[in-house]
Amino acid sequence: MSNILIKNANIVNEGKVIEGDILIKGGFIEKIGKSISIKENHKLIDAADKFIVPGLIDDQVHFREPGLTHKAEIYTEAKAAVAGGVTTFMEMPNTIPNATTNEILGEKYEIGRKRSLANYSFYLGASNDNIEELLKVDKKNVCGIKIFMGSSTGNMLVDDRKALEDIFSQVDILIATHCEDEMTIRKNSRIFKDKYGDEVPIEYHPEIRSEEACYKSSSFAVELAKKFNTKLHVLHISTAKELGLFEDIPLEKKKITAEACVHHLWFDKNDYSEKGTLIKWNPAIKEPKDKAAILDALLTDKIDVIATDHAPHTLEEKNNSYFKAPSGGPLIQHSLVAMLEYYRSGKLNIERIVEKMCHNPAKLFQIDKRGFIREGYWADLVVVDINDPWMVKKDNILSKCGWSPFEDQLFHSRILHTIVSGNLVYSLGEFDESNTGCRLEFNR
């Protein structure tokens, strides 16, 4: 690992922006100060008039490996991640085969070790009958358990009440849930299929995967968590109604937390007419009032984390009729620059963005020595120019699927440098792939 000295940066960390230098040695932040100088050889980065933020931690991605590598791979998506300032990801189990055993999970970790430029962790997936596997998880080395309490890509639905009660009552590790009520979705699907056949207009996606479906499932998850005192993290909140389930208290006092995703903050129902199935996600992008409420919940701390649910499919797969087009899309390369548009418009300050995308994921998952700019912590850092406009085009999209719902979007901020575990892996559009990222460790 090379030594790196970053000079003259506007350091965004723990609710403050201060001007200073950062010295990196042996993978870690050795010193933060006003005017650092060293005699030995080092890489110098002049960050004058630039922001430096902790590397983003994305707690919900789908990198599609193994089994679905025509859409994405850990290598390609981790590369897109670091180009977007995401230094750490937590990846979901709905690959092929489903990661519902510790043996399969171990195979995914081996792929990450060999091929990921970013730091990584992988969830073990729950099923209706794998409680014994869930109880064998090493909670110091695995980010959590994922339960699909609504069906999505991969057919991993857990819908047996006794199985859910067993999991919530016995598992001593964070449980992350996809919450949509399956019976409500099936009922709504029949109604629209009877009316339109297979050609249901995409605009009805939020009525099929409705507010009712989301609330019924998320409220049930919260009920189980309260009953059994479970550490629960509800992913991708998409409705204003669900926000009433969460408390506006400091994260350190919570056992039940919530996540917002970039697409639910950026798009709303009115965008289906232009974007079509490219913005078909589960849960669905819904009403403008829901988007506004989710943003407000970030300000009031009812929502704790901003993530992406990065979930690539090929354009051929997405360009299908409603029921055939899969849900999900690539976002990880553009999550930070998208949120910085909210900073530029005055809707979120940059300290709040860093809190929700860096500090809070580290706190929530109890990640060891990451998510903050602190002496003695791993050097996961991103240098950003907030005054360097550029436009998303096919030739600068790095996700393997080759498209983005942000195509032709003008962003005003640019990621200049990304440092992962002390290695300068991305700099001014170029990658250094001589080092891979690290497996996360957890203080549990």
Image: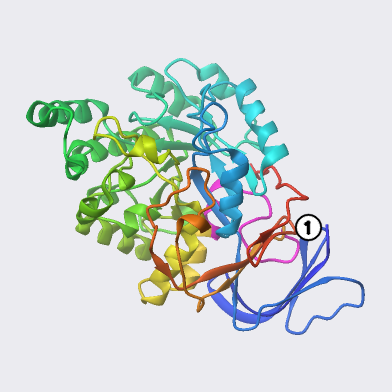
Viewer-proximal residue, 320 or 43? 320
Q: Can residue 366 be seen here?
A: no
Instruction: Indicate the position of residue 141 as horizontal and vertical percent values.
Output: 66, 37
Viewer-proximal residue, 257 or 181? 181
Q: Secondary structure at mark 1?
A: loop
Instruction: Indicate the position of residue 437 as horizontal and vertical percent values.
Output: 70, 47
**Quick check: 133 above or below 407?**
above
Any magenta on residue 362?
A: yes
Q: How many numbered circles are shown? A: 1
> Which residue is most to the top?
129
**Quick check: 145 above or below 347?**
above
What quarter of the picture does the C terminus occupy? top right
Q: Can residue 206 be seen here?
A: yes
Instruction: Indicate the position of residue 428 as horizontal and vertical percent values.
Output: 65, 67
**Quick check: 314 above or below 424?**
above
Residue plotted at (41% across, 50% down): 259
Any magenta on residue 62?
A: no
Q: Which residues are magenta?
A: 358-377
Q: Is residue 271 left or right of residue 223?
A: left
Instruction: Indicate the position of residue 391 as horizontal and vertical percent values.
Output: 44, 66
Q: Is residue 140 left or right of residue 282?
A: right
Residue plotted at (56% across, 52% down): 80
Q: Is residue 236 left or right of residue 335?
A: left
**Quick check: 332 above or below 429?**
above
* Residue holding disc 1: 27
Residue plotted at (23% across, 37% down): 209
Main secondary structure found in the magenta portion: loop
Q: Residues within 10 Å of mark 1 (few under 14, many from 20)?
A: many
Amino acid on which the number 1 mark rests in the picture: Gly
> Which residue is most to the left?
195
What quarter of the picture does the N terminus occupy? bottom right
